[in-house]
Amino acid sequence: MTRALALDLDSVIGDTRPLWREWLADAARRYGSIAPLDPATLAEDRVEAASQLDRWAEAGIGDWRSALGRFAEDRAPLHFRRDPETSTALRRLGANGVRIGAFTDAPGPLANVAIAHLGLGRRLDSLEAGTAALERLLMTLGENALVVRSSDELRRLAQ
């Protein structure tokens, strides 16, 4: 049996992209007069988009990561639903001694809110977000960790 799993947060546990896009639209409304914050001009890759937002923060939008975290906390119930099958699979794998981590290109505040809202914080040994998240997680879990990219794959592994 595999001793460690690296789960793609967005495709296995809960997709953070819709909430990310909603926050970008809200941020454009809030900060558009301060800095040229146009979600259409941001990179599709969220790591690159975060880098662009960091540059815009210097232009006056301020601490966008905290704003994203607060926004995500307010809207998490609309975007994330617990999946009993995923929870059961994670519980079963954890009980069998499998180390479980998750990775995402989403900024940390968004990833943390998603995991907390889904009640999976205690099921994960590690969560890595942002730049090189998968690589950092594999350094933590070990290079032999199996990367899981679908909930169906997770459920099969838990059987």
Image: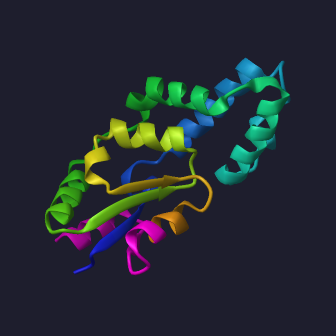
State the residue at coordinates (77%, 31%): 57
Q: Residue 80, image x and y in percent?
A: 38, 38
Would residue 118 appear left or right of 46 to someone viewing this image? left
Q: Is residue 147 magenta?
A: yes
Q: Residue 140, image x and y in percent?
A: 42, 66
The color scheme shown is: rainbow
Answer whether residue 77 is visible to the viewer in this image: yes
State the residue at coordinates (55%, 45%): 17
Magenta-drawn segment: 139-159
State the residue at coordinates (83%, 20%): 34
Answer whether residue 37 is visible to the viewer in this image: no
Which residue sits furthest front? 140
State the residue at coordinates (32%, 71%): 4
The answer to which image quadrant residue 22 occupies is top right
Q: Residue 125, image x and y in percent?
A: 32, 57
Quarter of the image for the C terminus: give it: bottom left
Q: Is 75 rendered above or below residue 93?
A: above
The answer to which image quadrant residue 23 occupies is top right
Would residue 113 appear left or right of 56 to someone viewing this image? left
Q: Is 140 rendered above or below residue 84?
A: below
Q: Residue 157, image x and y in percent?
A: 25, 72
